[in-house]
């Protein structure tokens, strides 16, 4: 009987399709494949330094019996590899090690391991050339968090906020809309990114009572160039519009930040931490005091 273990002789990686191609020196039984035995490495001599990623059980192969096994990377694994900015970006940082339990041949011989210190270099590398797409988004009007989900990992340093617009109608040409002017990401590169909206944009959204008050009047459009993926030859996001997937309405009470009085003009100026409805003002609820804890004060009248 055959007692010779199969050997991995080369591999190819296609970051465009998200596929890993393993070539062995004999036919292997792909139904035995355990992808967790596969580790993509930045270097071929160690795991101690550099970046690496072990595939998860979510990746799979639909090959049966062959010398070439195609591993379909799950979106989880593909996005994690892309998130690691120094791993698998080209020929110089793409290596593979394989544990002996990863696969067996047709006589149940386990594959010869390729240890991390002797990882194989990629034979053919295909760069990611696909534009990322906006998949969905959520908005929290309490915190001002805009969470955008793409179909692949994006580079958070490439966001161009002016190319993102929140609008009340599926067609951006109609209804209320706010073009973003700024903000910042609350996390690192990922396919799900939470952006902190700036105060000006958040207040402009709240000013428009027909925008972002329900799931039926909240849409987000990103124009081409709004963000880029992690590829060395960066792919700009494809233009697209999506309806909101979750809206958290504003339930936070406004706070009075400061006030000023002009006795000559007879004006009292109130500054709040968010937009308020001036028509709802009830002057009798305002008392001017001569000290923070003073009992001496004058209440306003209508």
Image: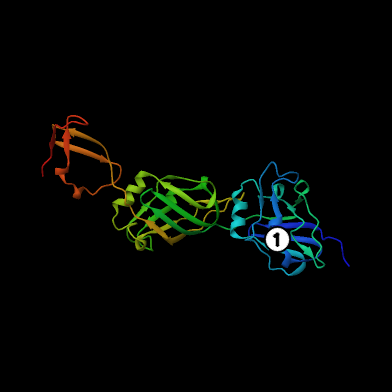
Seen as rendered, the residue at the extreme top is 291
**As drawn, is 105 to the left or to the right of 276?**
right
Coloring basis for residues: rainbow
Q: How many marks?
A: 1
Q: Residue 11: where, in percent of width, then height?
A: 75, 57
Residue named by callout 1: 34
**As drawn, is 231 to the left or to the right of 244?**
right
Q: Residue 226: where, in percent of width, then height?
A: 48, 52
Q: Residue 153: where, in percent of width, then height?
A: 56, 53
Q: Quadrant of residue 268?
A: top left
For the N terminus, which image quadrant? Answer: bottom right
**As drawn, is 274 to the left or to the right of 36?**
left
Q: Residue 175: where, in percent of width, then height?
A: 32, 60
For the C terminus, which image quadrant? Answer: top left
Residue at 17%, 32% (x, y): give it: 289
Q: Quadrant of residue 286?
A: top left
Depicted 102 relative to depicted 234: above or below: below
Residue at 66%, 56% (x, y): give it: 55
Seen as rendered, the residue at the extreme left is 301
Viewer-closest of 148 and 179: 148
Q: Residues within 10 Å of mark 1 (few under 14, many from 20)?
A: many
Residue at 82%, 67% (x, y): give it: 107
Viewer-closest of 24 and 93: 24
Residue at 42%, 51% (x, y): give it: 146
Seen as rendered, the residue at the extreme right is 1
**As drawn, is 162 to the left or to the right of 277?**
right
């Amino acid at each position: 009987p055959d007692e010779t273990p199969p050997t991995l002789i080369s591999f190819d990686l296609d970051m465009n399709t998200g596929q890993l191609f393993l070539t062995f020196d004999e036919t292997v039984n792909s139904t035995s494949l355990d992808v967790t035995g596969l580790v993509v490495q930045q270097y071929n001599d160690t795991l101690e330094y550099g970046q690496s990623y072990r595939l998860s059980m979510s990746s799979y192969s639909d090959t049966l019996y062959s010398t070439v096994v195609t591993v379909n990377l799950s979106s989880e694994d593909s996005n994690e590899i892309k998130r690691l900015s120094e791993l698998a970006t080209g020929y110089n940082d793409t290596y593979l090690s394989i544990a002996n339990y990863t696969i067996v041949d047709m006589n149940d011989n386990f594959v010869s391991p390729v240890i991390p210190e002797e990882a194989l270099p990629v034979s053919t590398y295909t760069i990611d050339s696909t534009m990322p797409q906006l998949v969905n988004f959520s908005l929290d009007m309490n915190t001002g968090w805009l969470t955008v989900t793409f179909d692949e990992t994006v580079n958070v340093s490439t966001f161009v906020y002016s190319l993102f617009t929140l609008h009340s109608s599926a067609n951006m040409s109609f209804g209320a809309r706010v073009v973003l002017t700024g903000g910042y990401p609350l996390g690192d590169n990922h396919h799900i990114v939470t952006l902190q909206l700036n105060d000006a944009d958040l207040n402009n959204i709240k000013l428009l009572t027909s925008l972002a008050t329900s799931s039926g009047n909240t849409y987000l459009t990103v124009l081409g160039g709004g963000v880029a993926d992690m590829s060395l030859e960066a792919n700009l996001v494809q233009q697209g519009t999506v309806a909101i997937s979750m809206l958290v309405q504003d339930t936070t009470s406004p706070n009075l930040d400061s006030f000023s009085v002009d006795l000559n003009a007879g004006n009292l100026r109130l500054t709040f931490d968010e937009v308020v409805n001036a028509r709802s003002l009830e002057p009798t609820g305002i008392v001017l005091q001569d000290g923070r804890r003073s009992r001496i004060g004058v209440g306003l009248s209508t």
